[in-house]
Image (cartoon, grey):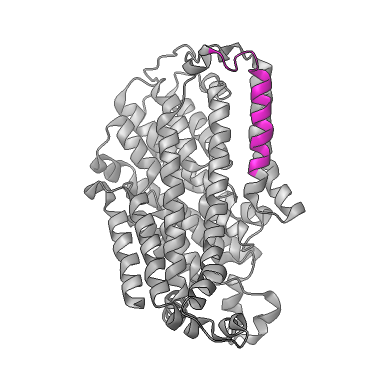
Amino acid sequence: MTLIIVAMLLAGYLLIATSHLTNVNKAAIAMFVGTVGWVLYICYGTDFVMSQYPREYSDFLLGSGAPASAVKTFIYENLFLKYVGKAAAVVMFILATMTIVEILDNNGCFDFIGEWVRTRSGKRLLWTITAIAFIISANLDTLTTSTMMLMIMHGIVQGRRQRMVIGSAIVLAANAGGCFTVIGDPAGLILWGGELVTATNFSAWLALPAIVAWVVPTFMLGRALPDRLDVDWQAAPYRGDDTNLNRWQRVVMLIVGIGGLWFIPTFHNITKLSPFLGALCVLSVLWGINEIFNRKLMNAEQMILRRTPRVLQYGSIQLMLFVMGVMLALGAVKETGVLADFSEWVDYNVHNIWITGFAAGILSGCVDSFAIAMTSLSMYPVVEPDILGRWMDADYMANFVQNGIYWKIIAFTTATGGCLLGFTNASVLAMMKMERMHIGWYLKNCTPKVLMGWIIGLIVLWGESLFFG
């Protein structure tokens, strides 16, 4: 049964990697593998539990007999709900942040971006719009940031080839920016929620590598742009009567929304509660302000005319279901003990976290960045610093303590490496669909530049580990 569950996960990863060819949504694949994996696990639950948790199961029975349903109850209460809780916390955080973005967007709070990038200079527009994408993606989801910035760019730049170049730079900047904060990427959020890293330490280490991964390919892509772009500055989109929100009201909402997200790490450090609760608190405050500012429009017919980013909303739902499916599938595989056995094999035969991280980055470009990141993170538990002396190779195991370098390597390589081939990254696929871009153009014009920025960023991270480690 262990072989069947592992084979299902590998087959699922293969289908996820080829979803652009089969046209089967990867969220559906992840959910199927996750649900069936736990069904198969519980069918042979007694064997798995007795091999992995014999003492805990005996304490659960309290010396009484073991009825047929006892092991299922034990798995549900002590194993399954643990993974559901972790996945639900990430999904709730994504849902809260997506709703915050939608409220801000519907009220025109992001229209300021169009004013900031108002220029005909190709280089200036490229660096301005990618810098904004880099900064915003550090606070919002990468897919959300990419879609929003691509929509803004699409309405400004008229030349299709110019849009392809700038759009590629936007996606790369968003993915690089999302990896250096704990709330910018689901993998970072899981690391932070699992207390594998702290927010300040994580950002301090990954800020410079992320900047390098953004600057290097952007500089190389910018050489293909002319000095003067063919641009069209359109009027702000009609949103119904919500355009009555004046400038200071939109600024207030923007500060509450984005500033509230910045406060979430502080909220978590003070309360030790899950980050999604802080995100829900920010959402509730912003929602209340939204109703106060738009109170004259509530229940009015004009509200129907509000522009709703349907594509963004649909993509966010897919992302949440995909995250839930992958985390449940990996939970079932982890409880079989296979991941622990595989990590021991890697430790013995590879014994180098940089090679492991490099391999994870390559695989994330071939399969999916989140799936590979979760697989790599699930292989190792966090090591308590006070027991390092018990290990034969304490220096190697120090990489897996809280704020250990291994967690940062995986977060960086999977996030930036996921853009290598393009077809496994949701942001790149959204850009390709929007600009009718062929995968061959991306592989020729973007992949070498992404690889260069990724490798240099990894070298910078390695240098930081030598200097500060």
Q: Quadrant of residue 281?
A: top right
What segment is highlighted magenta in the picture?
279-300
* Residue 82 horizontal/vertical position (percent): 56, 64
What is the x, y in percent for residue 211?
A: 54, 45
- Comparing 346 with 249, the one in front is 249
Asked if 233 appears above or below 3 in the picture, the reply is above
Q: Is residue 286 magenta?
A: yes
Residue at the extreme right = 270
Question: Does the segment drawn in magenta span residue 421?
Answer: no
Determine whether, in the image, residue 353 is placed left or right of residue 440: right
Viewer-proximal residue among 142 and 166 = 142
Which residue is rendered at x = 55% and y = 33% of the image? 101
- Left or right position of 135 against 337: right
Q: Is residue 140 visible?
A: no
Q: Position of residue 124 (x, y in %)?
A: 49, 26
> Taking the image as drawn, is residue 439 in sight?
yes
Residue at x 77% of width, y 52% of height: 270
Residue drawn at (52%, 12%), measured in percent from left and top?
A: 302
Between 183 and 1, the one lying in front of the other is 1
Query: Magenta stretch: dominant SS?
Result: helix
Instruction: Please count the marks in the image.
Output: 0
Left or right: where 108 falls relative to 355: right
The N terminus - image quarter: bottom left
- Left or right: 314, with 259 as reference point: left
Compared with residue 371, is residue 143 higher up or lower down, i.e. above or below? Answer: above
Please identify the quarter of the rendering in which residue 465 is found. bottom right
- Can you say which quadrant of the picture contains the C terminus? bottom right
